[in-house]
Image (cartoon, coloured by chain):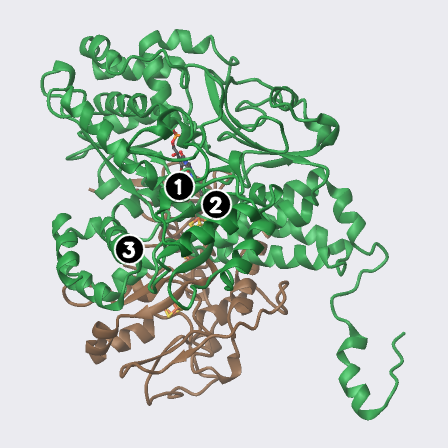
Chain colours: A green, B brown
Amino acid sequence: MAMQLENIIEKYNKDKTRLMDILIDVQSEEGYISEDAIKKIAGELDISLADVKQTMSFYHFFSDKPTGKYTVYLNDSVVAYMMGRQKVKEAFEKETGIKFGEVTPDGLIGLFDTSCIGMNDQEPAALINGKVFTDLTPFRVKEIIQDIRDGKNIEEMYRSDLGEGENRNELVRSVVRNNIRRIGPVLSKDYIPGRVIKEKLTSMTPEEVIHEIKKSNIRGRGGAGFPTGLKWEFCRKAKGEKKYIFCNADEGEPGTFKDRVILTERPKLLFEGMVIAGYAVGATEGIVYIRYEYMYLKKYLESILQGARDRNLLGKNIGGIEGFNFDIRLQFGAGAYVCGEESALIESAEGKRGEPRDRPPFPVEKGYLDQPTVVNNVETLCSAVKILLNGGEWYTTLGTANSTGTKVLSISGDCRYPGVYEVEWGFSVKDILEMTGADQEDVQAVQVGGPSGTLIGPKEFNRLLCYHDLATGGSLIIIGKQHNLLKDIVTNFTQFFINESCGSCSTCRNITFQMKEKLEKILDGKGIEKDIDDLVEWGKILKVSRCGLGQTSANPIVTSIRNFRHLYDELVAGDKDFESEFDLSEAVKASCDATGRIPVLN
Amino acid sequence: MSTLIKFTIDGVECMAEAGTYIVEAARENGIYIPTLCNIRGVKPRGSCRICSVKVNGRPMTSCTTPVADGMEIENNTPEINDIRKAIIEALFVEGNHFCPACEKSGCCELQALAYRFKMMVPRFPYNFPRKEVDASSPKLIKDHNRCILCKRCIRAIKTEDGKNVFAFVKRGRNVRIIMDPVLGEQMSDELAQKAVEICPVGALLPREKGYQTPIGKRKYDLEPIGSDIEKK
Ligand SMILES: Cc1cc2nc3c(=O)[nH]c(=O)nc-3n(C[C@H](O)[C@H](O)[C@H](O)COP(=O)(O)O)c2cc1C
Ligand code: SF4
Ligand code: SF4
Ligand code: FES
């Protein structure tokens, strides 16, 4: 152990900015990170013990106790519940004799909940020792636990065929399915790796590249929608010793899984996009920040990177462009949704807690290691390749006048064909329902843009997906009438934000929690009219939070009040305006029993 | 070379050097913006959000945002003040603050702000969380009931070679301040004293000392928080 730990620390040159990698390696070697290991790491990196602990304790997948020889992380997201998670969870507990959050006494199996793992189109799903198990049922759980007891290795526990496409790659070997249901410029197969570098980049100046991207009018696909050309230009103009391109592959918004599919099927397109961005801004290093949940793709992605190096699509004088050097490495996260926020992502990549930074300064001025940094979503970078190939002009012929191009959507929930659809901007929600074979009579609501987005009802199904109406990072969850919107959906989303808050802002740490308590009071039938108004008012306090997580964490409650007010009205007592959660008869019961008095209560 | 720029706070014309943080710029112009996590002279970290103002209509923290020419800042408006009051109330219910028994009463910035914003009863129900009092350090008593997680101690208290003595652990509602077991023990008395002074509330207290200034004669007993700035 001591020897191994030394090797791990040595592997990262005792660099404290690589603390995440060190912790990930120790966790995966040992199954947990012991107090001794923490001491050793702190000593070798010359930082305080407290520093190691503050990073380590931030991330869901780091543990200071053993988590079992087989560690099960069962997805906790809304869609998992819609698809039968509760029964699966109960089966796990019954078969193992332990509760979630515990490890069996023999140390064999650990059961844990985890936030959305990006498999919403094949739920209920779980990670077991880093490998994905999809479409779980109580029957499958029984088999899995038996297989574990029989000492099988993970792959021997698969009972289905491997998934399609590269999921079958020798380096992946996963049962995950892509479910690509509609293709466009990003997902289509007519892509020749390296072509844009060799045929276009070689004859363009960085300014011309930026000009082409600007002409396309593409905006960031990660949710915030910032114009990509402008971002690159800012970074190009910023002063720094070294510049960086980050690809944001953290994909933590529940219900989003399109980046997983792109990483699986089009990684060469993505890496080419990073090279183009690097050329445009004058960066020499690219880093793909990938969520821990997609670790099963690591070896495969690394082999693709090596292939690109071998073909001079990465490395020195790329594509023969004299003096253009650029390489890419992977950086894994360790389970924290907030790390998808671009400045938190940079902090995390520097080996720290994933707490968003105060802005200004913005990453394009002062990002990774305080150097100018572009952070772009996976899909944005992929689209950039096609823009250079076909021209910015061509891109504007797709989509609408103000929202150009295509969007890769992750669609899940109550529809016949959940999966990944690449559509031009301007589709209506109704189109989406028809496209995915949802029974429109049975749909009560659609969550557009994940928990931080909007919950809309049938009256609004003619709204359009575009930056001017329903802007979205791409997740749509279709919710059938059989679900209780407030109990099953809104409460789960609100709890998600509470779990995933970094805890830095007093507002995000406190107000979301207070709102959830109030929502539960209403759901318990103890609410009054004023509670609904309070929720709307309290939602406004969150707007002064530092990052998008806190700023949008009231959205599930506030947008459901806006669009489904009747559900709240039905639950509150309209005729009361006093504090109703206090039950006087209950409160005085014990003393009345003791004294034999009968209270007069009205 | 200094460049003076012009901006307005609630319509009042102000001037300051370009690049000054809004709170400081306001102070120089005799305008008080409440702060809690900010410490003058230490790199800001917008944690408490109480200094939020609207800059050209958008919420920003004034302790982290530099002034720029032509900025229109809203500070003393009913909307913003109510948010600040809500933040204070939420901090009170997040911990356990029994002011009359607290050594910091009268010098506590949280308490002083509650008075300034005329807080009566918090709009949020009390949570009465179970939190520990940690007296294991030879230098300091750490009372988690009173900690408002402002991170001042993390940012201001470092060893001579720049290492962190304090740190945050966990995340979300589980965050907690820890002291490095080794560095905390080696801390000089001066540094420990500095930690006590830097803490805006009574979460870090010296050992075997207390109540040296009688209640009633303490800083904010004498004048409300912010009044020194507004007097200028
Ligand atoms: C809490 C939070 C989570 C986010 N998660 C992601 C994510 O998983 N992937 C992503 O690309 N952007 C995410 N973003 C947006 C990023 O901050 C950033 O805007 C984006 O990566 C920029 O790339 P783009 O311009 O190509 O969209 C998130 C933002 C917030 C506030
Ligand atoms: S809004 Fe929430 S998640 Fe974002 S920085 Fe503040 S506390 Fe952290
Ligand atoms: S101990 Fe004091 S200074 Fe440190 S975070 Fe808590 S309240 Fe702030
Ligand atoms: S004083 Fe500015 S956020 Fe706390």
x then y, percent, for residue B54:
49, 44
Quarter residue B17 falls in: top left
Q: Earlier in the sequence, mark 2 or mark 3?
A: 3
Residue A549: mark in rendering: 2
x then y, percent, for residue A29:
25, 54
Check if mark 1 and mark 3 are on a common chain: yes
Amino acid type at image mark 2? Leu
Does the rendering let one see residue A292? yes
Question: Which of the two marks, 2 or 3, is nearer to us in this view?
Answer: 3
C-alpha distance separating marks 2 and 3: 28 Å
Q: Which secondary structure lies at badge 1?
A: loop
Read off the residue under disc 3: A27
Disc 2 sits on a residue from what chain? A
Q: Quadrant of the C terminus of chain B?
A: bottom left
Does the rendering let one see residue B3? no
Foreground of the two, A186 or A505: A186
- Residue pictured at 51% horizontal, 49% vertical: A141
Does the residue tagged 2 have its C-beta within 8 Å of any atom of ligand 1?
yes
Does the residue tagged 1 have its C-beta within 8 Å of any atom of ligand 1?
yes
Q: Earlier in the sequence, mark 1 or mark 2?
A: 1
Read off the residue under disc 1: A341
C-alpha distance separating marks 1 and 3: 24 Å
Q: Which secondary structure lies at badge 2?
A: helix
Disc 2 crowd, CA 10 A, few/some/many (<14, 14-19, 20+): many
Amino acid type at image mark 3? Gln
Check if mark 1 and mark 2 are on a common chain: yes
Quarter residue B141 falls in: bottom left
Q: Earlier in the sequence, mark 1 or mark 3?
A: 3
Left or right of B127? Residue A365 is left
The answer to the question of whether label 1 and label 2 lie on touching residues, with beta carbons closer than 8 A, is yes
Q: Quadrant of the N terminus of chain B?
A: top left
Disc 3 sits on a residue from what chain? A
